[in-house]
Amino acid sequence: MLAVPGPLPSTGVENRWAFEVKQDGQRAMVYLPGNGTVLVRARSGTDITAAYPELLPLAGSLGTRSAVLDGEIVALDEQGRSDFGRLQQRMGLVSAPARAARMATKVPAHLMLFDVVHLDGRLLTKLPYEERREVLEGLGAAGPAWSTPAAITGHGAEAWEMAREAGLEGLIAKRLTSRYEPGARSKSWVKIKLHRFADVVIGGWVPGRGRLTGLPGAVLVGERRDGLLHYAGSVGTGWSQAERIRLAELLHAAASDPCPFAQVPPVAGARWVLPRLVGEVRYTSRTRAGRLRHPSWHRLRPDLAPNDLA
């Protein structure tokens, strides 16, 4: 079951919702047949058990009880927050179990469990979330590499503020009466992302296609450090048509042959500009290399000069 993006439920109805921390990792379904084995599948259905050997002890965590659990595999940073950049070092190691075992000691993974869809031969998808959550918590699923994080009923504004102060990615709001809808992106689950903002310098752009022919499909942005412009990512959303046309005019006027970034970004078809346009972008988090994750355009900042960002 998948969530849709949306706003925080209003105060008047928040007591109909539970709020969980939005984890930034790899979605996983965990199959525990109760015979001492465990199977972990990615959202695509791929068997990823071998990539996460620290989850193998889950096989005996419920004894002989059988269950199918839903959760998110994460890698935690020093503050205990999920860090997708760290987790990427663990993903894709299904065919390399020896390397996966080595990486497990360097970048340990942790499974955050948040739902139970099958237990002791009984399908639970038609039960409301509130009842499934009670069943899940009753399992006492907690171990060295897995846990069942808390869910808060109501108090959405307080949960939001707590997530913001902790620097978390956001919240998932789940309607207490909702059934589990396998494979569906349901309005009964709402993901509310906390956005961060950054002032960036435009160093290049990539032409759009189709209806965007002649206009920027994306701009390549950077941040100044030590007098150099370091590439921070590609931004391709967030403009109205009028804003995109205006930006195209500014980019054409600033056209330049040399790349202004300290290192040329690996972007095919890039066109470079003089690094004089400053903009503000929204983003969710950063990669380990400092790149912006899920950036979207917010506005031009004509009040700022590139040197103001040094």
Image (tube, grey):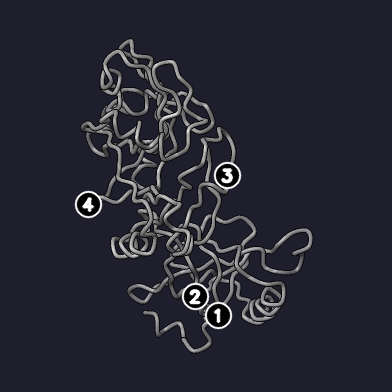
Q: Nearer the viewer, mark 4 or mark 3?
A: 3
Q: Residues within 10 Å of mark 4 (few under 14, many from 20)?
A: few
- The answer for how far apart the CA atoms under marks 1 and 3 are is 35 Å
- The reply to whether the C-beta atoms of the residues labelled 4 and 2 are less than 8 Å apart is no
Amino acid at pointer 4: Glu
Disc 2 marks which residue?
Answer: 280
Query: Does the residue at mark 4 contact the one at mark 3 (Cβ under 8 Å)?
Result: no
Judge the density around disc 2: few (<14), some (14-19), many (≥20) Cα neighbours within 10 Å: some
Q: Which residue does the numbered mark 1 point to in the structure image?
A: 300
Q: Position of residue 261 (x, y in %)?
A: 47, 68
Q: Which residue is mark 4?
A: 78
| Nearest to N terminus: mark 2 or mark 1 | 2
Point out the tag, 4 or 3, that comes first from the N-terminus. 4
Q: Earlier in the sequence, mark 3 or mark 2?
A: 3
The residue to which callout 3 is attached is: 186
Residue at image location 34% in from the left, 59% down from the top? 159
Secondary element at image label 2: strand
Q: CA distance from mark 2 to mark 1?
A: 6 Å
Quadrant position of the C terminus in the picture: bottom left
Q: Pick whichever of labels 4 and 2 is earlier in the sequence.
A: 4
> Is 305 drawn above or below residue 51 in the view shown?
below
Which residue is at a point 46% across and 23% down the rendered structure image? 47
Q: Amino acid at mark 2?
A: Glu
> For this view, does 293 lie left or right of residue 61?
right
The answer to the question of whether label 2 and label 1 lie on touching residues, with beta carbons closer than 8 A, is yes
Please state which of residues 160 and 237 is positioned toward the viewer in this rendering: 160
| Residue 214: mark | none
Considering only order in the chain, which callout, 3 or 1, is on the residue closer to the N terminus?
3
